[in-house]
Amino acid sequence: MPASYPNITKSNELWQRSLGLIPAGTQTLAKGPGQWTEGVAPKYLKKGKGARVWDVDGNEYVDLIMGVGPISLGYAYPAVDAAIRAQLEDGITFSLMHPLEVEVAELLREVVPGAENVRFSKTGCDATSAAVRLARAFTKRDKVLCCGYHGWHDWYISVTDRSAGIPESTKELVFTFKYNDLQSLEDALDDSVACVILEPTVFEAPRPGFLDGVRALCDKVGALLVFDEMWTGFRLALGGAQQRYGVRADLACFSKAVANGMPVSALTGRADVMKLCEKDVFFFTTFGGEALSLAATKATIEELRSKDVPAFLAKQGAKLREGYAALAKEAGLEASTKCFGYDARTIITFADDRSSPLAMKTYVQQEMLARGVLWGGFHNLSFSHSDAEVAQVLGAYKEVLPLLAEALADKSVEKRLRGKLLEPVFRKTDNFHLKPRRA
């Protein structure tokens, strides 16, 4: 396919208008310009249909980001949009509760293991923060051990290097442990810990016995186990990681894929823990029962279930993962770049002595954009990613990977960049804020 770097004039004009007006220029860090190739990547999208998007300058792309997770079925998906329009005729937010609160809670109880009780909110970090508060109330303990990304609220972001404005007393109550390393958890876990919260898998698969081991260690000291299923819920399996791996969490948090782009989150779990929300723990929001999002949730889950969407995502994702591996080998890059993860969501990694991983990723993104693929280093698929989209993506890789091989061979990766290097979201991503070993 002919490479053609997109004209992004209108994107840049909008960006200039945002400067000095919107801090960081973006509401979502992963969508901001630091994660996209300056001078090549569009900054603003205008519309989407199926698995494709169009930027404000009219350029069309196959989207491998899908709203950073929420678009599980596809943009402008007919069944979901019809449900939203039908509800819109009756209203959005009401002065009393709406029947959809009951109907969607019942649906979640059917499909999510252990969802004895259900509460709704708007964002993923609403749900994870409520889970932590519930665990502290239930166990009458304060400390939290976490593994993964859990949102912007104080209790979690205090363990990162973006923790300005958070009291030291909060930072002293939350610690991290290493994924797939039961010893690092056991070293930190004692009877002062209220809960262990983790993403059951991100891209690295859990080693045999790891999640079962986490469950057993929590039971041993009386801490609750919380699964953050923002990425695994409704993609890894309809019932998420609990269904896929057969390990029951005490509380499980969902958002993203559950409503195909509408803002909603759900906290599910044991009735004896969740009942504290009745009087002891305050977790209420004006928009928790907002009806458009609940109508979208109901329609999305019904589509995911009736069409076995997780199986489709795995099938299409496997084509990309296996195709990428074959093309990397063909280009002589099998040692320099890999594609791995669970098939519905895989990541591309880079490692080569002749260039930095970030420079390699920036160059690949630049060239994928020139071939009509909105690429951020991973494959996040939807039900609308047909064989045609998979073929276009693999066709782009077939052209781009040999270019990367050439650039590595003559050590010119950074010289070929048309803009600045991509930025990491967090400067520290592993082995930080670990709880001191027990005596």
Image (tube, grey):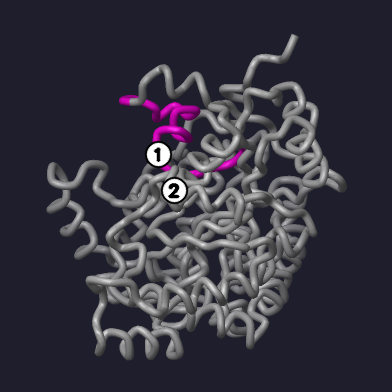
Labelled disc at residue 125: 2
Point out residue 281 in the picture as x, y percentages from the top left corner. Answer: 43, 44
Q: In the displayed orientation, state which residue is furthest to the right.
A: 208
Q: In the displayed orientation, state which residue is furthest to the front.
A: 279
Q: Secondary structure at mark 2?
A: helix
Q: Could one spot residue 413 in this view of the protein?
A: no
Q: Is residue 75 above or below residue 183?
A: below
Q: Secondary structure at mark 1?
A: loop
Q: Residue at x 44, y 27 (%)?
A: 161
Return the residue nearer the eye: 234 or 60: 234
Which of the 4 image quadrants contains residue 180?
top right
| Secondary structure, magenta segment, majority class | loop
Labelled disc at residue 153: 1
Q: Residue at x 73, y 29 (%)?
A: 185
Stretch in magenta? 147-165
Q: Quadrant of the C terminus?
A: top right
Q: Which sits earlier in the primary sequence, circle 1 or circle 2?
A: 2
Q: Is residue 76 above or below residue 176?
A: below
